[in-house]
Image (spheres, grey):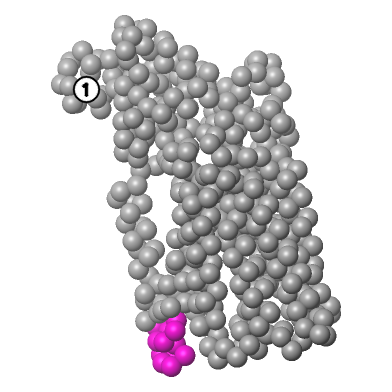
Amino acid sequence: MVIGRALVGVGLGVVSGTVPLYISEVTPTPSRGSWGALGQLSTSIGVFSALLAGLPLEQHHSWWRGMFLLGCVPPCLLLLGMALVAPETPRWLLLHHSMQAAARAAVILRGTEGAEEVLLELTSAHPALASHHACAIESHSSASATPLALALGSHSTEKAGSHHSLASASASASASASLRARTLHTPLLSSSSSSSNSSSGGSNSNCALPPASLLHPRYRRAVLLGASLFALQQFAGINAVVYFSSHVFRAAGFSSGIGASVLIALFKLSAVLLAARLVDSAGRKPLLMLSFLGMGCSMCFLSAALSLPFLQPHAPVLSIIGTITYVTAFSCGVGPIPSLLLPEIFPLQVRATGVAFSMAVHWVCNFCVGCFFLPATAVVGVSGVYLFFGAVCFISMAFVHSFVIETKGLSLEEIEKILLQKN
């Protein structure tokens, strides 16, 4: 059982970082927020389904084996889907392979028109790539050629059956390979001179950079933003509230702890649906600030309900209202948006490493809250701990207002430019 839980933990740690990263790189810019929130929505649906699957456990104690077997179905479906259907992301292929491979993946993911948009974003963000395509168009003597047509090369010639196009495809592939060789020392999205690039502390590579590159000032803002958002998310008290919710509901007369958890998960699911609808219209930053504000007010309400003498007769009911309000406010912004922002704010060369580091901060802070919540309540009481969480929420709102940039409607490359300029 311990080994199984450890393996599930490892898998959860990997998926929690790679899923938002993959979604952000394959979805269109105008709807990237909604798709990212749907990733969190899927997680909420999974939690809700797992709680429902656990309901028979209270009456039939041997049901835990069937419950674990049901848990094997989603990861198997995910494995088959990623292995047989989903391609690698175009941005990763551009970084590690070639423009031609990136173009083929873009066509699979977004169709011809969407693939053209993806390649235009990448080439406009990388001057060397734009220069390469201009040279390729000139060498092919085709004024109507597009980056997609040149990058796909041999794929389009299979449909046309033209020997001349086959030769063109070969030339395009060779040009793409030579491009990658020429731009190994050109920083992505950098329009500065080569002298400034050489002073960028090892960031002047078109390949993925080692983890130590996160320490360089070029990426400092993104690293601090990613790590801080997840640290504040955890120290705002979400896991403590969830841990304590069963006790709150029992005090109010609920006999089933699992039933109370199902009710909380239902409100959370509804709030994530609302976030998915609003994140691309209202923006990430306003939703984050309103979410922290709602969480802070809910924490103060909970603290008052548990500590003020004249509220004690109504404390169980008020605690349920405060808990549901807190979870709803969390799920409208602070829950889904940090995972959405994370892959948006890291430059391509350090995106995977930055996401992994920030998720590590997330789980370390999660562990700390779980370890110290009960000892802290023994010292200052539950109301005192909730008051601390409320203070963290208000501080987090000020942090978001001062340091988080709005990424609504911006491509990943445009966001990278903005952050690098701020550095």
Residue at 61%, 84% in the rendered image: 249
- Residue 56 lies in the magenta stretch: yes
Q: Quadrant of the C terminus?
A: top right
Q: Say which residue label 1 marks.
A: 157
| x then y, percent, for residue 186 | 57, 22
- Can residue 307 be seen here? The reply is yes
The mark total stands at 1
Q: Is residue 389 magenta?
A: no
Among the 4 quarters of the image, the one containing residue 116? top left
Q: Which residue type does callout 1 highlight?
A: Thr
Is any atom of residue 349 visible in this view? no
The vertical placement of 186 against 101, above or below, is: above
Which residue appears at 39% of the width and 83% of the height? 65
**Picture quadrant where residue 209 is located:** top right
Q: Residue at x 65, y 89 (%)?
A: 251
**Label 1: which secondary element:** helix
Query: Which region of the structure is painted magenta?
Result: 54-65
Q: In the picture shown, does residue 145 fall above or below 271?
A: above
Of residues 348 and 312, which is closer to you in this image?
Answer: 312
Q: Residue at x 44, y 74 (%)?
A: 50
Q: Is residue 395 left or right of residue 9?
A: right
Q: Give coordinates of residue 20: x percent, y percent.
A: 50, 50
Towards the viewer: 202 or 373: 373
Name the image quarter holding residue 364: bottom right
Q: How would you classify the magenta stretch by its main secondary structure?
A: helix
Give coordinates of residue 64: x percent, y percent.
43, 84
Residue 277 lies, with reference to residue 235, above or below; the image says above
Which percent across, then down, holds residue 164? 21, 13
